[in-house]
Image: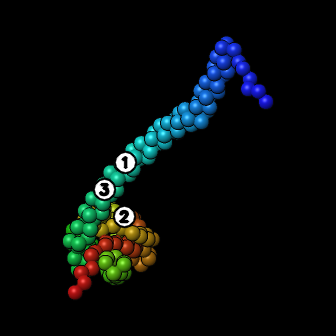
Amino acid sequence: MKAMRLAKREKLVVLGGAGLLVLLLALQFAVRPTMERASTLHRVVAEKREVLTQLRAKRLEYERLQGEIGHLHAMVAQQRGNRRMLSSIENVRKACGLSENVLSMKPATVTIDNTYEEVTVEVRLESLTLAQLVSFLSQLDAVDAAGITALEVRRADRNSARPNDDSPLLAATVNVATVTYVQHK
């Protein structure tokens, strides 16, 4: 076989075609994937920045909640438990003038995670007016770190009604609770 002889013009056309083919292959296999990768990276960076912003917001919320929990731990650690709760209720009872209306005050304690105790006191009242009950409850509600967890109100027996008084008397059971820190010895 004889080698083909190409004219100068034909050689230029073949070289131009080969150059165009090399350029198209370079675009297809080098430039295009690089451009797609850069586009993907820009999109991923934007998404990651959004996630970072959300994480920063969550961190700030976490730090705020940790501060609140620390404050609650400090408050609970200052509580003296059963004795303080009973004396607080006793002070409220005296302030409301309900010395003769209290049938009983029953304390109960439940341990939570060997670190805290929930102290609950059940106060049973009888022969009191609605105004006395409301006064007692509002003053109990103002007691620091204690909360009313249950309330049962009913009409008192007819036998306990006051003569010459038309206002009905009530009987009530109030549960008051607080949480205290357990100090291990």
Query: Percent position (x, y) of residue 84?
Result: 22, 76
Q: Nearer the viewer, residue 51 or 79?
A: 51
The quarter of the displayed image where residue 30 is located: top right
Q: Type of residue at label 3?
A: Glu
Q: CA distance from mark 3 to mark 2?
A: 45 Å
Please tell me which residue is depicted at 34% across the width and 72% down the height of the picture.
Answer: 176
Q: Type of residue at label 1?
A: Ala
Q: CA distance from mark 2 to mark 1?
A: 49 Å
Q: Which residue is mark 2?
A: 130
Q: Secondary structure at mark 1?
A: helix
Q: Secondary structure at mark 2?
A: helix
Q: Which residue is mark 1?
A: 57
Give the class, few, some or many, for how many residues have Cα within 10 Å of label 1's Cα (few <14, many ≥20): few
Please tell me which residue is depicted at 47% across the width and 37% down the height of the picture.
Answer: 42
Please tell me which residue is depicted at 36% across the width and 48% down the height of the picture.
Answer: 56
Query: Percent position (x, y) of residue 144?
Result: 25, 65
Q: Type of residue at label 2?
A: Leu
Q: Earlier in the sequence, mark 3 or mark 2?
A: 3
Task: Name the side, left or right, on which 83 lies relative to 132.
Answer: left
Q: Which residue is mark 3?
A: 63
Above or below: residue 174 compared with residue 103: above
